[in-house]
Amino acid sequence: MCGIVGIYHKNSDLNRSLGSNLASMLIELSDRGPDSAGVAIYRDSVAESQIKLSLHSSANIDWHGLGNALSAHLDGPVSVEIKASHALLVAPKTEGSVKQWLADYDKNIRTMSAGTSIEIFKEKGLPREFVEQFELTNLSGTHALGHTRMATESAVTTEHSHPFSTGMDLCLVHNGSLSNHNRLRRQLADDGIDFQTDNDSEVAAGYLMWRLREGDTLQTALEQAIEDLDGFYTLAIGTHDGFAVLRDPIACKPAVIAETDDWVAMASEFRAIAHLPGVEHATIWEPEPATVYSWGG
Amino acid sequence: MRFDLKNDALRKLNQYLHENPEKQVAVRNPAGRHNIAVGIDADIDVDIHGHVGYYCAGMNQNSRVTIHGNAGPAVAENIMSGCVRVHGNASQYAGASGHGGTLIIDGDASSRCGISMKGIDIVVAGSVGHMSAFMAQKGHMVICGDAGDFLGDSIYEAIIYVRGKLGELGADCVEKELTPIHREKLASLLMLAGLDHSVEGFRRFGSARDLYHFDIDHAGKY
């Protein structure tokens, strides 16, 4: 069992409340996932010439020192913002691999996300502790995904927590379990998709990245996922400017969507949505099995 | 008696319902919480104003529980008697394993409605999702809208009435004649739910009884 949530703003006046709404949704689903919690927030897009990176390390890292070294390496300004065990870096975009440079700089560093607007934070422990640690209620943004994890198939670590991002601004949260992830991981790795863990959900994120790279739209990539992913899943997916939901054909993992003129929200259970402002005017439905729902991008 | 779950603890409500409650109980601000009004055994009316989470009115006996909103998974699970009515839609497993009583859903029911039902009568004014009435043993299911795929898979002696379109039927579920006895029962269930459909628009489905015992000739159907 896990809990997943997502919120997408149609009205930008609401952007300031994104973090506090996301926090209340996560905390409401604590008993679906007390092992770890995580969010992907889309906000503060950087310039086209820049890249935004969310980094994590379980070891102590001098993040500002790292920023200075990266700045020298790229010959351009690098900003650093520390958030608990994570750091957000904005650096000049480069042809070469910043990810490889970071791994060479310190093997403990994990790149949780890369893109123009995505930020990923995740950590072991209860959602409430996570919300406080990362001061989630202060964050604004356009859309976000969240996950509360009850681990069933791989270790309880920060790296194994959701959301998973395997490509620029793309991320995914998953409730369920995939049964063909080992074979898919091998195939995708042969095609150059980079995985950081043995987690099944990361394979779903990698699969979508691969389909998008091969020229699919998010819609067609998800339609093909219904054919290629074997197992149980309710997925919420975020892109730079889009948000999507997909359930497997058996649809035993729960999901509810609510939509108003101002926002769209999805959650494993209605109680996570019940306290959002304006919910009394929302259209509420349970997404159909094997049907792609998407908004924006 | 009134409860507001914004302030009142859910345990307080359920304990009250188990200990000589008043005839009329109203519950406000359910906010999708689980296990609201479970395990009642009293001749009372409970009105819940809003959407409820998992297992609402589970194991109900004798009482009439009305949900003025949507119901989460497994509403009226294992109901023994009485009546549960959902004015909105119901999620998965509505009426699962129900032994008796009535479940009326004014909207749609999701997948696996009436799974393993054992005597409950379920009336759905809208449609039901896939795998509904799976392994249904006893009781009646009236579907005024459409039925999703695999209706009545591995069904025993429950009786299903469908007014709308059918997906693929489940294993061992077949159409049967709508006899006068069935018309009478169907009419009484429609009347109970306050629906004025003519019984003539319905088709009856039940078990072909080919899968009751393992038979090598039927191996392909399991």
Image: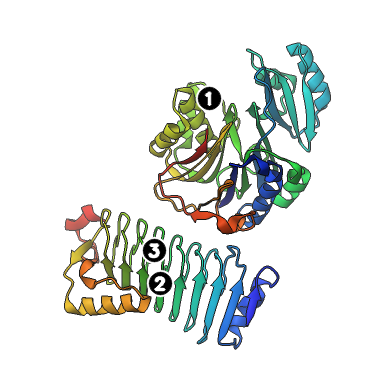
Residue labelled with disc 3: B113
Query: Which x, y percent locates residue B43?
Result: 50, 87
Instruction: Compute the Cα span from label 1 to label 2.
Output: 50 Å
Residue at 17 percent of width and 75 percent of height: B179
Residue type highlighted by circle 2: Ile
Q: Residue furthest top?
A: A75
Is A283 left or right of A135, judged from the image as shown? left
Residue type highlighted by circle 1: Ile
Taking depth in this image into account, of A20 and A188 the one nearest to the observer is A20
Is A252 left or right of B30, judged from the image as shown? left
Kindly indicate whether the residue at mark 3 contacts the one at mark 1 (C-beta within 8 angstroms): no
- Callout in the foreground (1, 2): 2
Residue labelled with disc 2: B104
SS at mark 2 in the image: strand
Query: Which x, y percent locates residue B148?
Result: 32, 55
Q: Disc 2 or 3, which lies upstream in sequence?
A: 2
Considering only vertical position in the picture, is A128 above or below A105?
Answer: below
Residue A143 appears in which quarter of the rendering? top right
- Callout in the foreground (2, 3): 2
- Say the numbered circle drawn on residue A284: none
Chain of the residue where label 1 is placed in the rendered structure:
A
Query: Which x, y percent locates residue B182?
Result: 22, 76
Residue labelled with disc 1: A193
Residue at 63 percent of width and 83 percent of height: B1
Residue at 59 percent of width and 36 percent of height: A164
Color style of the picture: rainbow
SS at mark 1 in the image: loop
Chain of the residue where label 3 is placed in the rendered structure:
B
Considering only vertical position in the picture, is A277 above or below B61?
Answer: above
Is B78 left or right of A163, judged from the image as shown? left
Instruction: Compute the Cα span from label 2 to label 3.
Output: 12 Å
